[in-house]
Amino acid sequence: MNQSKSQNQKRTSKRTGTTSTRKNPSSFVLEMPLSVESQEAKVLRSRFEAGRNLYNALLCEAVKRLKAMRRSPEWKAACAIPKTPDYKDQRKAAFALAREKYSFSEYALHAFATTARTSWIKEHIDAVTAQTLATRAFRAAQRMCVGQAKKVRFKSKGRGLSSLEGKSNNAGIRFILDKPTEGNGGKLVWGCGKLEISALIDWQDPVIRHGLGCRIKYVRVIRRKGSSPKAEGADCTGHRYYVQLVVEGKPYLKPKNMTVGNAVIGLDLGPSTIAIVSQDAEVARLEQFCPEIRVDARAKRRLQRKLDRQRRANNPDNFDEKGQIKKPATAKGKGSKGKGKRFVWKDSKGYQTNSRRMANADRKLAAHRKSLHGKLANEIVRAGNVIKTEKVSYKGWQKCFGKSVGTRAPGMFIEMLKRTVARTGGTFLEFSTYTTKLSQVCHGCGSLEKKPLSQRTHKCECGIGPVQRDLYSGWLASYVEAKVEVDPITKTETQVEFLSVSATLKWEGVESRLSAVTDSLIQRANEGEVFPRSMGIPRARARLPQNLSPTTAKNLAFLKGKEEAVSKKRIPRLKAGGDSVVFCS
């Protein structure tokens, strides 16, 4: 058994002939556009549609097996087993027995995919692609099984599938490079019908050269909506097609990103700001998070209203007198299951055009945001290889700061920063805000003071401060340490975070550097730059000219006096000869 295990861990590359001892070596994704002709686009559309139908059938079968398994006595008996560590193995074996009895597993769904891939679907989807679709369907049902999702989502004809992939570069969807004697091109080869599509390869790009020099694990075909069917590289339905190569190895790094700092960095990330401070405050930054992103909210809102008007004009029968969508009428016949009749929504060409415009704008925004996230993550890693930040519920932020979180996506940035730190061999620590309370604590005397969000400075009676609140929290985050404590009774391990005592010893010199950052921001604000209110930087106000002409000064004095007269509280007085009340100045 040990010998077979060692053989499985060895992987030999056919291209280089080298052997990898890791079972799952690191990999990255290389994407290139495809040069698709009209006839090839027609074949791709039919295969994506066949894949959609097969995926829905597999997902329906997985949900049926899941519901039957949950109703079984074996499942109820497994749920009745206590969740204590002593019964952990027994509980796991009971659930595994229920899964095996009702064939709720990934490989059981692979076997069903072989029988479901018949008739016309067999002409478009090969066996390997069908197995990957079965894996996707099982993962969706598995999320509902373990409580991570309440329901599954079937792929409608309007949405369709966005990707199809294989399992290796030997069968199904493959990518083949031309031989050196034939040229320097490459093509996508799909086994069913021997579909061959050329890829647009830019050999001048170092990322492309690096990726194509690595071993290809498997291939994925992607389609995305363009701005219109007349867009460059789009087919008659407005889709562009790309090939993604999942290759073995590490991604290409720019020379400037190869250097990794050795400082300990503390982050304080907000919905619209970010503070980056090292322990010695040599690195101290307070800036707006992703300031280059500019969303034209007015134009987007106008386009959304236009889409709503077009939808109402195209489907007048689906709305009631109040303008709300009607509720489907419940069927009341013998043998009826109580399901309502589904509405049919009609989309005009103008509605489809505006929908593509909206989707294209969101796609550009997402691409720009991802680029800014990667740039900032590399800048942080170049400063230090130990990153510490608070563990925040970004879903909770969406309730209070929905627009800012939706535009800048701080949660996606943290995930990208984690991957960047792991790639460079650094350490990333997320600690609980409940145990540390960095926005309330004072490291000098250890007192806790709950501050409102409007208070953007920290000042304590012990002499600490005034210092900007986000910068101070970022500096304290760099001194948070974690240790693992073992419960002697239950033998469970718990990670405990605490603020290091050395923060008090190194405060000298740090306060002046943090104040210098705030002073530079105030100077920029006085010059006219606008910062978010969460920074606590006062905005520049309109100032009067120093030398005023006599006429201008007289007019300003007159306006000021009139404004004061109007602002006085008017006193009610009785009018002579009657009981009516009038207000006199």
Image (cartoon, rainbow, N blue to C red):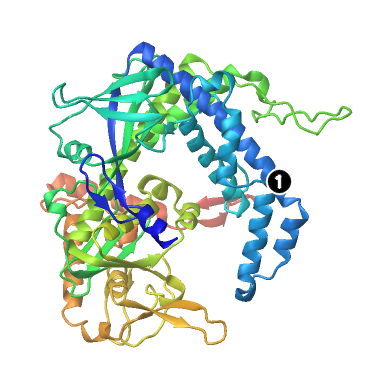
Residue 114, compared with residue 145, is above or below; it is above
Left or right: 275, with 302 as reference point: left
Residue drawn 34% across the image and 24% down it:
189
Residue 372, compared with residue 427, is above or below; it is above
Q: Is residue 131 visible?
A: yes
Q: Nearer the viewer, residue 550 or 172?
A: 172
- Given the current orientation, which residue lies at the most extreme top position? 39
Residue 450 x %, y %: 44, 75
- Given the current orientation, which residue lies at the most extreme right position? 334
Residue 226 sits in quarter: top left
**Could you tell me which quadrant the N terminus lies in?**
bottom left
Q: Nearer the viewer, residue 136 or 402?
A: 136
Amino acid on which disc 1 is placed: Lys
The number of discs equals 1
Residue 382 sits in quarter: bottom left
Left or right: 132, with 409 as reference point: right
Q: Nearer the viewer, residue 162 or 107?
A: 107
Left or right: 478, with 224 as reference point: left
Q: Is residue 540 visible?
A: no
Task: Give the class, few, some or many, for how many residues have Cα within 10 Å of label 1's Cα (few <14, many ≥20).
Answer: few
Residue 223, compared with residue 66, is above or below; it is above
Left or right: 380, with 124 as reference point: left
Residue drawn 33% across the image and 38% down it:
365
Residue drawn 15% across the image and 70% down it:
282
Residue 486 x %, y %: 48, 83
Residue 432 x %, y %: 43, 71
Secondary structure at badge 1 equals helix
Q: Which residue is mark 1?
A: 67
Residue 265 x %, y %: 25, 68
